[in-house]
Amino acid sequence: MKQKVKLKGHLKSYLQTNLILGMLLALVNVGIYLIDMRAGMCISAFLVIYLIAMSALLYRNKPMIINEFIDFAARYGQVQKKLLTELELPHVLMDETGRIVWMNTAFEQIIHKDKNYKKSISTVFSSIVKDKLDFEKDTEIELAFEEHEYTFKMKRVSVKDVFDDSDLIESIEDADFLIAGYLFDETALKRALRENDEQSLAIGMIYIDNYDEALESVEDVRRSLLIALIDRKINKYISSIDGIAKKVEKDKYLIIMRKKALVSLKETRFDLLEDVKTVNIGNEMAVTVSIGIGVDAPSYIQNNEFARTAIDLALGRGGDQAVVKSPDSIVYYGGKSQQMEKNTRVKARVKANALQEIITSKDKVLIMGHRLADADAFGAAVGISCIARALGRKSHIVINSITASVKPLAELFRDRNIYEEDFIISSADAIELADSNTVLVVVDVNKPSITECADLIKSCKTVVVLDHHRQSSEVIENATLSYVEPYASSTCEMVAEVLQYIAGTVKVRSNEADCMYSGIMVDTNNFTAKTGVRTFEAAAFLRRCGADVTRVRKMFRDGALEYKAKAEAVSNAELYKNAYAMGICPTEGLESPTEVGAQAANELLGINGIKASFVATDYNGKVYISARSIDEVNVQIIMERLGGGGHLNIAGAQIADTTPERALFTVKSTIDQMIAEGAI
């Protein structure tokens, strides 16, 4: 590197002192001339000789003086270099590309290289790639090397700035940058922190989902044996991870373990869920359990609250699964089996009484479903409006846009002699009506982000939720009443049951019964999927109220374009892994293409060997994925990976800024990942 060295600062002033004194003497000489001419001439002669001599000496001795200073600086630099070389802190200098220029002894010992090693730092630490060397401010990188954990701190050093700060050298041309790196061994600290974290407390709860039903399926004399075997399975499982299981109720356990044990449970994906199903002493129904665990909270009380939230989520999603909640995330495991239908209607009666009290305490009732409302959402809303009318309260159904499937149902309410003009209103009108004397009933959805109007939930202080979809981490918080039953075939089934327990006689008109009946019919795919005894009992009740099967069937016949689009989606479907059907639904000319896509997904399940079907539909700037299965695959957990949700065998998701082809590729990648993890 070519350098141009000049003197500056105090050194330059010191060397020029004699010349400055000579100039001052010249000024004095002028005064002497005024006093004595001869004395002035003598001093002038002396001054000329003095200036010539001093200039010559300064010009001649300047290189020698500079060399002396450089020699001193070099010796001083050698002392500094030796101290830096022997410094215990590992230190390295690199150029801008990461090539090692110099390193001290401590750094050499760590990387097992000598001082002549001049290759890139990435050849030693693979995690330090070129992009990480492009920084402005000081930076640091966490890296592991030979069973040690280090923090590598780097700073950019300008060679020009170093010389500019010097009092000896004025400038240096062709300056470059160097990168100084310092290696801090934090192995012991991180190991201690990790061990402390692993020893932290995790609190959990285990609930037996079908305790009463399982006991009823065995003889009386063998029930105690079944209970003992279940207890033994749970206690042995928790003891194997050095945890404690305490039975607090006949079907509930409190468990305490270390976080380290929880890691092993996650690795085995909570195999207790499957192990407990092997308990069989003649019981016709397999026993299933739900597990909720809270971890990483700042206090034990908060961990306990996390555990309660987790077990509520597990039960709300149908049971037979484990949920782990931490401050940052909620993780689900299991959930591969369909929840068994409850034979008792006690819960429906209790919820009906609570709903009646809430509605009678308010003046107005707003009823809202999910965006792009379907027959189940609209039918359930109509059922709630029947309850409001019976209790003497005015109700409004909130729908922004009436889809093709809801249009024939909405036409049944155009008779202004029976229904007022504001029976169906928009979100904007609903927000204006909302006040402290308004109750909002949300039906067929429990995720606020996909409701017809999320702001309406915030505007109403009293909120009631009725839904049959499995809950996810996103729920409507602070609901006054929440009635979520994943085993129900549809929300219309739930509302039909509630109707029967409202005090007094609720008169359901035939068109209203048609709406609720159609909701059940559509969600069960004409009573072929997810139906139970209570489904048919609800249908029978609606039939007695005047629902006409033929009339409902005629309302839901497809148009020619819809039928052709559905046929095209089925005919062009791709088989993935010989078990998953992937199709794309055309949208041209269709009024409600998402519903056609859902119907196509149902049709694809009719193919022999298909475990699940996925149909993508591009609509309104988003790709809607309809996922369906019969019983082998839980499509809900697949759709949750894509930000959606639903049921074990009926689910969906919405993806923005993509195409149907890319969306299906994402589905395939998700399936591959979940198969590798053992999730499906």
Image (cartoon, helix red, strand yellow):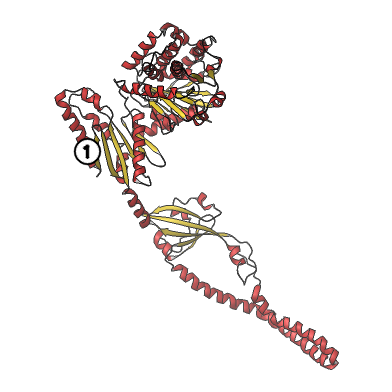
Residue 242 as seen in the image, left or right of residue 19: left
Query: Which residue is found at the position 54% from the left and 14% from the top?
Result: 420
Q: Residues within 10 Å of mark 1 (few under 14, many from 20)?
A: some
The one of 548 and 393 positioned closer to us in this rendering = 393
The one of 501 and 447 positioned closer to us in this rendering = 501
Q: Quadrant of residue 428?
A: top right
Q: Residue type at mark 1?
A: Asn
The one of 102 and 247 positioned closer to us in this rendering = 247
Position in image of residue 315 (x %, y %) = 33, 30
The vertical placement of 19 against 229, above or below, is below
Query: Which residue is found at the position 31% from the left and 42% from the top?
Result: 203
Residue 436 as seen in the image, left or right of residue 244: right
Query: Which residue is found at the position 30% from the left and 30% from the top?
Result: 320
Residue linked to disc 1: 235
Position in image of residue 212 (x %, y %) = 24, 25
The vertical placement of 661 against 77, above or below, is above
Q: Quadrant of residue 326?
A: top left
**Quadrant in the picture for the N terminus:** bottom right
Residue 151 as seen in the image, left or right of residue 532: right
> Is residue 7 in sight in this rendering?
no
The vertical placement of 444 against 505, above or below, is below
Query: Which residue is found at the position 63% from the left and 70% from the top?
Result: 169
> Is residue 583 in sight in this rendering?
yes
Position in image of residue 522 (x %, y %) = 42, 15
Residue 18 as seen in the image, left or right of residue 413: right
Label 1 SS:
helix
